[in-house]
Amino acid sequence: MASTPPRAINLGLQMAAIKAVLPAAQGTVRGGELVCTVPLQPTPVSRRYMARIAYRHRHRPRVTITDPPLTLHPRATALPHVYPGGDLCLHLPGEWKESMLLVRTILPWTSEWLLHYELWLVTGRWAGSGHDHAVPPATQRPEDPM
Amino acid sequence: MDSLDQMLSMLLDGAVEVLDISPDLYGDAVERYEEVGTWLAEHGSPGWQIYPQGSFRLGTVVRPGTPGGEYDIDLVCRLPLHHESTTQERLKQRVGEQLVAYRRWKKDQGHTDAPESLEARRRCWTLGYPGFHLDVLPAIPDDEHLPTGIRLTDKDLWEWQRSNPIGYADWFRGRSELSTRILEKRHANVADVPIWHVRSPLQRVVQILKWHCMIMFANDPDNRPPSILITTLAGHAYNGEEDLFTAVRSVLDNMPRFIKKTNGKWWVANPAHEEENFTDKWNEYPERREAFNAWFTDIDTTMSELAHMEGKGLDTVYERLAKSFDRAPVLHSYKRYAASIGAATDNRMGATGRLSPTAAGPRKPSHTFYGQHSSARD
């Protein structure tokens, strides 16, 4: 098993902390990698999404949504705040550190990402923090921009 | 947001708020009609009174959905005359002459806020202003229903029409104050004016029902159920619910019980004037009753479908709302919600990934959704 870098939280502890907050989470720590799937529903109206987190020390935690499939706003060509491989962009470099608990950072950020994603499907504008990802305006706008 | 009902309430409230009159336009309208009232009193018409009635007085105004749709503001212009000392025609004429004189005076003074137009309609004189018009209904006291009963003119009817808009508004306010939240606010603010800065759940319920009705009957205005009927039934059916969506559901559940059949006639009495039947027309034109039933079934179905949309997705709920209401106000509400959560920093995550300021889980530290990258990196 890979050694834990200084100040980094042990992967077993990370997994236990996730299960303490999100009892439906299922995961393993094997070969120095934490892999966990967890259902997330940001609000009572939101869908229940299955998120998969894969994390190794000295690497960024990777989060993908495995179910249901993510769709696009009618005028968008790509999802906002997603890496080309399909995992979610949840933070700027440096905002997440290995000394942080995934369950206090990456997971709430994922839930928040999902909330903004469903609103983006409606409004075409990403209202969360980060770079603007407005879709191009329709030829005939139904309303004024906010 | 902790429950589906609360979220639907927030989304509906944000949409109907767009259709409500803005505080600025409200202020303009009050200023205009108060000036008309003052001018009339100062120019040889002692005892004349102008006061608002209808949805403006009730706080249930909904902007018409037509392009450039303007707010209708109904005013009573009450002259201290006895019905045997005047006729409907003479009363209408006298009020009209005064309004013509007022408008001329405004122009002579070089005022820029003079009414743009003045025209006679069936029951009123209409003064046009930017964004709204004032419908001035000539009236005299109804000596059989003092102090607030009035008699109104109608050029198509031989008999005086009777009404009691102040009594009705008092009744409606009493029903609104079944909400303890609103009752407490009223007690904190003693000023006796019809401006209700905070809309009560009942006011919002009525606005939602009227909004839906207006859209459903956009191409069939003759059969559209009258606002006063919807408002009266909602007032009776309301039981003090504080949550808007819960209140809408409960009002719809209770509403049919308040439609009565008396001596073979459909009957919904004016709560402030028992002789007036808001469903009078149903007895003459059965299609009006059918239209009401069609409206009721549609809004009831809409609300009950929404009540079952837990976990269906915010975008799916949006499409359902947009199907029964206007798209633009619903979209506005979604944008407002998105902006509010974009700015929120106090969310916690609960056991199912639920984000809420009240969830017991870990507080979410601030972070920034990063942009799209040409290549994934650590």
Image (cartoon, coloured by chain):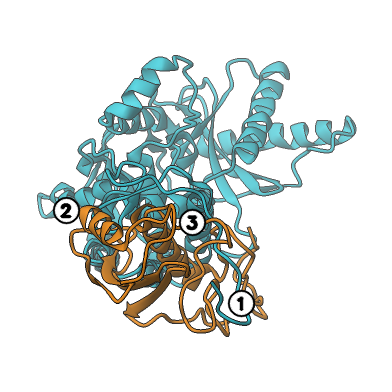
Chain colours: A orange, B cyan
Distance in Å between CA atoms under marks 2 and 1: 53 Å
* Label 3 with label 1: CB-CB less than 8 Å: no
Disc 2 is attached to a residue of which chain? B
In the image shown, does B298 or B353 lie closer to the viewer?
B353
Asked if residue A20 is positioned above or below residue A139 in the image, the reply reads above
Residue A23 spot, x, y in % from top left: 18, 59
Q: Give the residue pinned by disc 2.
A: B253
Location of mark 1 (residue): B373
Report the front residue among B93 and A123.
A123
Q: Specify whether residue B217 is in view.
A: no
Q: Chain of mark 1?
A: B
Residue ID for mark 3:
A97
Q: CA–CA distance between discs 3 and 2?
A: 54 Å
Q: Using the rendered view, name the quadrant where residue B50 is placed.
A: top right
The residue located at (18%, 64%) in the rendering is: A24
Mark 2 Cα shell of 10 Å, populated few (<14), some (14-19), many (≥20)? few
